[in-house]
Amino acid sequence: MHDSYAVNVDDVSKSFGAIKALNGVTLRVRQGEIYGLLGPNGAGKTTLIRLICGLLEAHPGTVTVLGQRMPNVAVLRHIGYMTQQAALYPGLSVEENVAFFASINGAEDGVKEALELVQLYDRRASVVATLSGGMRQRCSLACALVHRPELLLLDEPTVGIDPQLRVQFWEYFRRMAAAGTTLIVSSHVMDEADRCQRLGLIQYGRLLAEGSPADIRVQGGSQNLEEAFLALAGRRES
Amino acid sequence: MSGHRVRAITRRLLQGFRRDRRTLALLFVAPIVILGLLGYLMRGSSSVPAVGIANEDSGPASAVVADVLRHSSHIKTSDIDASEGDAKLRDGSLVAYVVFPQDFTQKVAAGTVSPEVHLEGSQPGEDSPVIQALQQAMTSLASQVAGRNVSFQPQINYLYGGSSYDTLDYFGAAFVGLVVFFLVFVITIVSFLNERSQGTLERLMASPLRRGEIVLGYMLGFTVLALVQAAEVLVFALAILKIQNHGNVLLIFGMEALMAIAAVNLGIFLSMFARSEFQAVQFIPLVVVPQMLLSGIIFPVSSEPTALQYLSNVLPLTYAVNGMRDIMVKGADLTWSALQLDAAVVAGFCVLLIVAGTATLRRRLG
């Protein structure tokens, strides 16, 4: 039923008043891959993610997710969305938070598995307000994946967390992708790019380049991804 | 203590307000609006109660008294038939009526003045001008039958309330519902705003939840809390404060529930227009004070200046307060058309706010 692309973004633009957040972006994400959305702050990454999960509507352009034109409520049960800020209920425990997001997605049986995956099962009774930033991020991730979504949208999931936890997060992402989940991960940290199978480089609301990390290096003419990115960005500007 | 550092704090504070126009407006416009409203209400109100006179006596004594009553500045009189008096008290067109029985003049001659005074009784403040006017009339009668010792023994009947009915009974009936309305409103607006500011609302919107489900879920959750609170308030009002109640406790509870649901939805709706808890808190005086003044809690709507009556008549709280008083003071039940109207208006307002809240959810996220 679905085509081989989990996400199909076709010539999408989005403006907020006079500000053009996205300008004619086209990209495709294959099923089961980790797709990195890279770009500086304010490049349009969050807007693109919000378009993909239907919180915003493209104008003009179309976004198709799992074969359905967005926005479409029916598709949302197959999408997990981890917002940039760890959006949790501070007065509830870890388990209560995860159980809440499980139940609104009709997946009450996934709570234990999700808590174990992010290694918070032993801390499940802790009230979120008392947790460290890193633990909140993990809890937030558990909330996003508790219903075993086919597509997981992660908006800068590793911002503000220590290197050890970052490695752990990428390990979770790799395992989920191996199990068939499609992941779109936004980041402005270039050393995370190498962990993605494919990348989309965004700046000023435009897609600068798309391809595997190796492709990007070739396109940018540098072995260093950061330099390649800067080269591509400079080429577009000139 | 460094003056420089103190100045830095003062300056920082004023700089912040410079960009927060809404707070500035609240600071400088709200007091004028509120005081202006209060002034207009108190100076512009016509609180002359309407009194009916039923004169069944053909003798001269009742004519003298009736004439003085007609010219009294404390009351506004009209001639009625004694049999229609109670109906007029019920529909609110009169606050009292005085009956001079057939033997009134005879009794005056025998030394006793005993008119029947029928008071509506639900508004304590409106009884005294009636009694005052009557006393003036009696004094004038006494002066005309000089030399005789006339004793004034009015027979006072209350349609509602009674002689033990006091100001607390009158205000209590309204406040039982109001306390619930305002507290629930404050809690809802702040927690719904939290849902926005902590980012969880965005998450909910990206889930299969429909907007109506979010609003309904919120409504039910807060209504559960509100009902427990309403029960507590009711028990305290009836058992500890001993506020008079002539109605069915379940009906009071039902009205409170309706008010709570309206408050929850008002909170959700208004939270869409606030960007921070600080701004949300500013809605409280804006919502609370004008409704306190205009919904008939303190000043009866019928005595307000006409222009304000139009405003009062579109405020849902006017109907809620009226309904609560009808139940508790007058013992109204659902067969009363007045109570049906009050309940229907409050329920209609709930529906309107649910729709508005649901619609604005999309607007702010899109």
Image: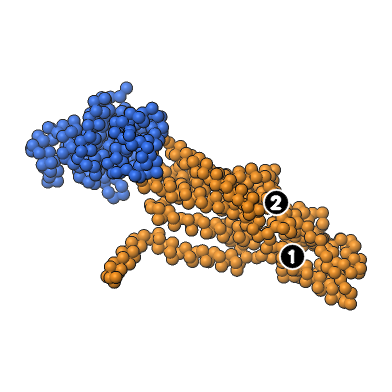
Chain colours: A blue, B orange
Q: Mark 1: which secondary structure?
A: helix
Mark 1 is on which residue type?
A: Val
Q: Position of residue B146 (x, y in %)?
A: 87, 77
Residue visible at 17% across and 36% down? Answer: A193
Q: Is residue A202 left or right of B59 when viewed as pictured?
A: left
Q: Position of residue B61 (x, y in %)?
A: 87, 69
Between A117 and B191, the one nearer to me in the picture: A117
Q: Mark 2: which secondary structure?
A: loop
Residue visible at 49% across and 41% down? Answer: B221
Between A187 and B310, the one nearer to me in the picture: A187
Label 1, label 2: how far apart the Cα atoms are: 20 Å
Q: Quadrant of residue A101?
A: top left
Mark 2 is on which residue type?
A: Lys
Q: Position of residue A79 (x, y in %)?
A: 33, 32
**Among the two numbered marks 1 and 2 on one chain, the one whose residue lies closer to the N terminus:** 1
Q: How many marks?
A: 2
Q: Residue furthest bottom?
A: B147
Mark 1 lies on residue: B130
> Quick one: quadrant of the N terminus of chain B?
bottom left
Residue visible at 75% across and 54% down? Answer: B159
Is the residue marked by circle 2 packed among few (<14), some (14-19), or many (20+) residues within 10 Å? many
Is the residue marked by circle 1 packed among few (<14), some (14-19), or many (20+) residues within 10 Å? many
- Mark number for residue B330? 2
The chain letter under disc 1 is B
Looking at the picture, does residue B152 appear above or below residue B287?
Answer: below
> Quick one: quadrant of the C terminus of chain B?
top left
Q: Is residue B260 left or right of A147 when viewed as pictured?
A: right
Residue visible at 72% across and 70% down? Answer: B73
Q: Quadrant of residue B21?
A: bottom left
Q: Residue furthest front?
A: A122
Q: Residue furthest top?
A: A1
Q: Position of residue B260 (x, y in %)?
A: 54, 46
